[in-house]
Amino acid sequence: MAKNIIPSDATLAITQIKSTIGGKQNQRDTLRSLGLKRIGHTVFRTADAVTVGMINTVPHLLKVEEAK
């Protein structure tokens, strides 16, 4: 689980690890805005303030790693 990611110029690999079924609409919208569509789907984003804010909104649904 991602906990309190801070903005930087690193590239993050963000993977959805839990379903949005039964979740709040804003959490579903946040995952969609990150570009995630299904469990196991991974996207790569820079750790800017907007992306970090979205990650910190739904940390229980994501796995975040620094991309190599």
Image (tube, rainbow, N blue to C red):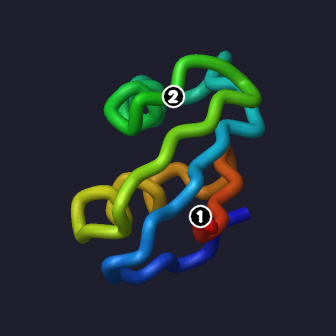
User: x, y percentage for residue 42?
Assistant: 62, 37
Circle 1: is it few (<14), some (14-19), or many (20+) Cα within 10 Å?
few
Q: Amino acid at mark 1?
A: Ala
The residue tagged 2 is 36
User: x, y percentage for residue 21?
Assistant: 66, 17
User: x, y percentage for residue 34?
Assistant: 39, 38
Q: Label 2 to label 1, Cα distance in Å?
A: 16 Å
Q: Amino acid at mark 2?
A: Leu
Q: Quadrant of residue 32?
A: top left
* Residue at x 60%, y 57% (from the top left corner): 59
Along the viewing direction, whichever of 25 and 59 lies nearer the viewer: 59
Q: On the picture, is 54 further left or further right than 19?
A: left
The residue tagged 1 is 67
Q: Above or below — where is 29 with respect to 57?
A: above
* Residue at x 52%, y 79% (from the top left corner): 4
- Disc 1, SS: loop
**Quarter of the figure that contains the N terminus:** bottom right
Query: Cβ–Cβ below 8 Å for labels 2 and 1?
Result: no
- Disc 2, SS: loop
Q: Above or below — where is 27 with respect to 56?
A: above
User: x, y percentage for residue 46?
Assistant: 35, 62
Q: Above or below — where is 64 with respect to 31?
A: below
Along the viewing direction, whichever of 19 and 11 lies nearer the viewer: 11
Q: Quadrant of residue 64?
A: bottom right
* Residue at x 37%, y 53% (from the top left corner): 54
Q: On the picture, is 62 further left or further right than 37?
A: right
Of callouts 2 and 1, the N-terminal one: 2
